[in-house]
Amino acid sequence: MLVDVHCHLTAREFEGHVPRVIREAVEAGIAVIITSGLGYMDALRALEISDYTRVYPSIGIAPYELEGYEEVLELIEGERSRIVAVGEVGLDYWRGDRDQRSLQQVVFEEFIDLAKSLDLPIIVHSRSAGKYALEILMRKRAERVVMHAFDGNASYAARAASRGYMFSIPPSIARSRQKQKLVEKLPLENLLLESDAPVLAPSRDEINHPRNVKVSAEWISRIKGVSLEEVEDKTTRNAVELFRLRV
């Protein structure tokens, strides 16, 4: 039994195919998928397709598309009993405009405050901004944190892991030395599995699917020198406890 803690079943690549994508994931041993809605309308779609048996929703907003973020905050507040996490939210210094960074930071802090007040985990996007995102999270005393597809320095990640922060590993670990180093550095107790489907596939030019979190688990097993069963058991326990999943 595996848990995909972060993907986007509402992406256009899956339009009209969501039941098949979920079925294929279940056949591959994925018991739970957490799908992230980005922005108000996408969040409504994530809520609509969540069955709370296989698929659970989280709600967030892309750091580089912040227009209407206040509506997303209100939606999270109103749907607090239906979501398992806030996110993804965070910082993007690769795609976002440089003059927008201060706004990204302010909005990120608002989502952190909301997640803390609702006692929900926060799933963090931190592309080319891992150090800065972690600094904000630590300063705000965030505790239930998932750094999704973290692309920063492994040593800095290890310091965050010592505070209990979790790091979710995508199937792109198969082609990313940075992700491999991250797994080398971090304890298994701080690792989760994610697909980030439809992106971050094992091969650069393919559409990713939740079923591919099995690839993440296999790479973690190989790098850590532990059995695949131990990786599956520990990452699933981590996810169930963090997101308080009913499985």
Image: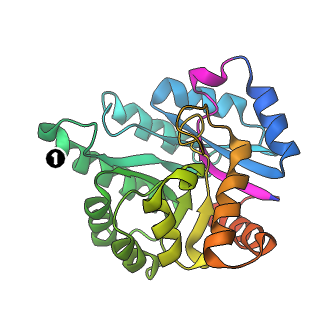
Estimate the x, y position of residue 104 in percent, counting from the top left. Answer: 25, 44
Residue that appears at 50% across and 50% down: 86
Which corner quadrant holds the N terminus? bottom right
How packed is label 1: few (under 14 Cα within 10 Å), some, or many (20 or more)?
A: few
Label total for image:
1
Q: Nearer the viewer, residue 35 or 81?
A: 35
* Residue 48 among those drawn in magenta: no
What's the amino acid at mark 1?
Ser
Residue at 74 percent of width and 22 percent of height = 17
Instruction: Establish if 143 lies above or below 3.
Output: below
240 shown above or below 80: below
Task: Name which residue lies at 28% across and 64% down.
Answer: 131
Q: Is residue 3 magenta?
A: yes
> Is 72 located above or below residue 11 in the figure?
below
Q: Which residues are magenta?
A: 2-15
Q: Position of residue 214 (x, y in %)?
A: 73, 54
In the image, taking residue 73 as reference, residue 220 lies left or right, namely right
Give the image quarter of residue 44: top right
Q: Residue furthest right?
A: 27
In the picture as drawn, the residue positioned furthest to the top comes out as: 16
Q: Is residue 117 visible?
A: no
